Amino acid sequence: MAAELAKNRPARARVQEKESPWNDAVGIAMLVLAAMYLLALVSYDPRDLPAWSHLSPTDQPSVVTHNFIGRMGALLAGYSLFLAGMATYLVPFSVTWFGVCKLASNVKVTGRSWLGVALMVITTAAIFEVQDVLNQRDDITPLGGGGGLGYVIGGSILANLLGKVGSTVFLAGIYAVGFFLASGIHPLQALQAIRQEITQAWETYQIRREIAARETEFDGNPTAVSAPTRRRKTSSSEIKAETTPPGPLVTPELGLTFEPAKPKIIDSSASRSHSDTPDKPRLSEVWEKKRAQKLEQAPHGTLGNLAVRFKDYKLPELDLLSWPDESLHKPTDTRELLAVQDTIIKALASFNVKVEAGDITRGPAITRYEVRPVDGLRVARIAALDDDIARATCAERINILAPIPGKDTVGIELANRDKVIVPIRELLEDEVFSNGKAKLPIALGKDVYGKTIIGDLAAMPHLLVAGATGSGKSVCINGIITSLLCRFAPDELRFIMIDPKVVEMQNYAELPHLAVPVVTDPKKALLALRWVVREMESRYQMFAQEACRNFETFNNRNRKRAAANEAKKAAAAAEAAANPVPEASAKPARAAVTSAGKDDVRVSSAFARAAAAADHLVDGTTAPWDDPEVAKELESETLPVELPVDHNGDWVGDSQPPRPKARSQEFIIPDTLPYIVVIIDELADLMQTAPADIEVAIARITQMARAAGIHLIVATQTPRADVITGVIKANIPTRIAFQVSSALDSRVILDRKGAENLVGKGDMLYVPPGGAQPIRSQGALVTDDEIHAVVERCVAQGKPIFDVKVDDETGEMGDDEDEDGSGVSSEEEDTLEKCLEVIRQEKKASTSLFQRRLKLGYGRAARMMDILEDRGIIGPGEGAKPREILVDMDMI
Ligand SMILES: Nc1ncnc2c1ncn2[C@@H]1O[C@H](COP(=O)(O)OP(=O)(O)OP(=O)(O)O)[C@@H](O)[C@H]1O
């Protein structure tokens, strides 16, 4: 208790000893002196005193035979006992206390402390005399138990003045003052500490009684087990603990009654089955309706190039995804949960850590046992006992939330023996996914309370997924891709997949949503990232031309303009009807209408060309950087890291956004742009090739791509600081950590420990955008069969179309009619002739060669290559190599 008191001492009493090299020496000296003094006292015999001492019983010179400390000890003890009697013993004990304080450097020993000791000794001596305690007058204490001081102050003065009782009360008061002066302990704090000790003892007694009562009850009442079976129908059912709740806690001194909340058992592990959800329109139907509306509202019926291609696209139905077999879900055994909770409470109690039982929440993969620390118990003490709780509960790994954010309890999380999977379908059917509030909804998982975790990639705006191998990253990434495929058509969202591991993204190679073929060569990944940067810059350029700040305003601009024009036309018509004017003066009104539609006309002409160009988009197999010239440009590009963008990623610089390099003078501005989601799985492989360049490219994309509708998901199984660098981390605030092997890895991912306590197989910590605390959850499971089914449905509706839209020449391609039904216009036939001539001269064929020699744009040159390949003149593309010429050119 002394230590407790010392801790609780008020600031003014807590005089900290200055760190001084002498503290230890003085402390040790004090302890030694105190020990010697005590030894001298306990072994005191007057016969050891020299003959000259008036306390010596003889006049003969003596030899010291008894006192442990020799003649000096005998003299010191003799005169101390003569002066203060038995109260002298207080002195060595006080000096021992001061010595300890010196060594611990926590309380300064001042003159006040010594004064306190003096008061204590004098008052004790006086009390001994007044109360006649230890008061025999013998050789050791010739003046009685209180010595000379006690005799004079207690016996002669106070007893005569105040009487026996009065003197005792008075002396006790002075003694208390002396004690507080000597120890530096404030009287109120002392009282509080005593009260706390008593309360704790009482509460421990009550907890023990409660645990005993629970045990007796469960031994004799097995019916409690049926509770979960009864409640299984509800998704997040609350089962009241079938225990005798602790009675109300009455605090008589305040007259208040505090009824603690009854502990509950919450079972949120079961997945919500389709039968639980009321009949709702299907997600694909809802979004198709919205999509059809959007297409209808496009001005003049003109659309962006991709929208033309995919206007009849149907989103994959959720029926392609399966529900887990409900019969495999074992009911929650409340008895087992309570038994584990009791084990935890007992384990803590055995370390003198007193806690009360709180709620138990069974999630899909883990169960959270809450315990409420009694007043005055630091939660850190519970957290420090994690290994002991793990031992007591025989758990492999446990995680302690001390405290649970927003609650007054500490959470102890243990893995469930029977894990319940979270099917992705459950999340995709959730209201949060389909209500349209999230622009880019991604299904992530379910937290321990059964709440679905559906993130909005648009708000994140970039995501880092990391964890050890086999912990569930790929499943998580597949879940994210599946969510997006079930929600977006290829003209609304496009993927760029960078997969140096080669196997992870092969399922998606045919997906019409791909903006470029899946990149598996780590060296090409840098080109792909630089291409994304270019795409981002060209988007900013379009935004600038259309006076839009970001992706949202850009995609909505035409609908807004069309609506505004409709309103103006309606207003003009109404005015004309109200004030009919002669024919001659009708002209200005018509002119006004025309000018109102002027913007549309400009935009419309661009769309017309874009729509026409759509017919010439190539179902490609090559990426832009497969063209050696484009590759060269991308390779030589150097990227600055800092850009003048605000925290939303909106451009705030004085100048216009940078004009993309190697672009022609005129853009074809589509009606809408698709989102671009770049997925990198695995970052470590890229960082081995060109770490600095990759880092800069990622930093550049993450800094400003959000406003351009470009979002990045980076996954790695190597959470090391040289892979997830500071620059990358600083720009990707949203993180998901799966199980890792050490707290160090966890810190690299989340900037805090915790991921090392996860149990694998989808158990994850999710740090949402702007969220300080990671949310522990079980990731959604999407199986390979489900992925195949969804991808097949998408692939059946279109092939991937790789980007050929960038050049001005494409704008002119749609003008000529297709004459022979082969899909090749007469103008293209002319260009083909020129291409054949080039091949004849150069003895090789490549897109860049046509671009250079015939001054064609990339799109037109690629189209020529495809026609030549279709006609069997050149062989299929092999990366950046020139195509094989299959025919004798002189014969053509
Ligand atoms: N959300 C989940 N629910 C249930 N089981 C899961 C979940 N996520 C992963 N698993 C299980 O864990 C296994 C490994 O998952 P996954 O392949 O995603 O790991 P990984 O971290 O990508 O490993 P690697 O880095 O080696 O590819 C899966 O085969 C699956 O059995």
Image (spheres, rainbow, N blue to C red):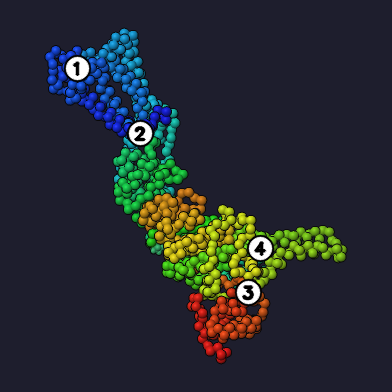
| Identity, as a three-letter code, of the amino acid under mark 1 | Ile
Q: Where is mark 4, residue-wise?
A: 545
Vertical order, 868 against 354 (above or below): below
Circle 3 crowding by C-alpha within 10 Å: few under 14, some 14–19, many from 20:
many
User: Residue at left 54%, top 60%?
Assistant: 640
Quadrant of image for the C terminus: bottom right
| Mark 4 residue type | Gln
Chain-order first, disc 4 or disc 3: 4
Viewer-side residue, 516 vs 359: 516
Instruction: Name the image quarter holding the N terminus.
Output: top left
Q: CA distance from mark 3 to mark 1?
A: 118 Å
Q: Earlier in the sequence, mark 4 or mark 2?
A: 2
Residue 446 in the image: state x and y as whole percent. 45, 55
In contact (CB < 8 Å): disc 3 and disc 1: no
Depth check: 492 or 62 in front? 62
Residue labelled 3 has its Cβ within 8 Å of some atom of ligand 1: no
Residue found 25% across the figure and 26% down from its top = 34
Q: Nearer the viewer, residue 235 or 678?
A: 678
Mark 1 or mark 2: which comes first in sequence? 2
From the image, state whether disc 4 or disc 2 is nearer to you.
Answer: 2
The residue that disc 3 covers is 810
Question: Would the CB of label 4 be found within 8 Å of ligand 1?
Answer: no
Q: Is residue 887 above or below residue 283?
A: below
Q: CA distance from mark 4 to mark 3?
A: 19 Å
- Look at mark 1 in the image and give the residue it sits on: 140
- Which residue is label 2 attached to? 20
Position of residue 463 measured from the top left corner of the image (x, y, whole percent): 49, 58
| Badge 1 vs badge 2, beta-carbon distance below 8 Å | no
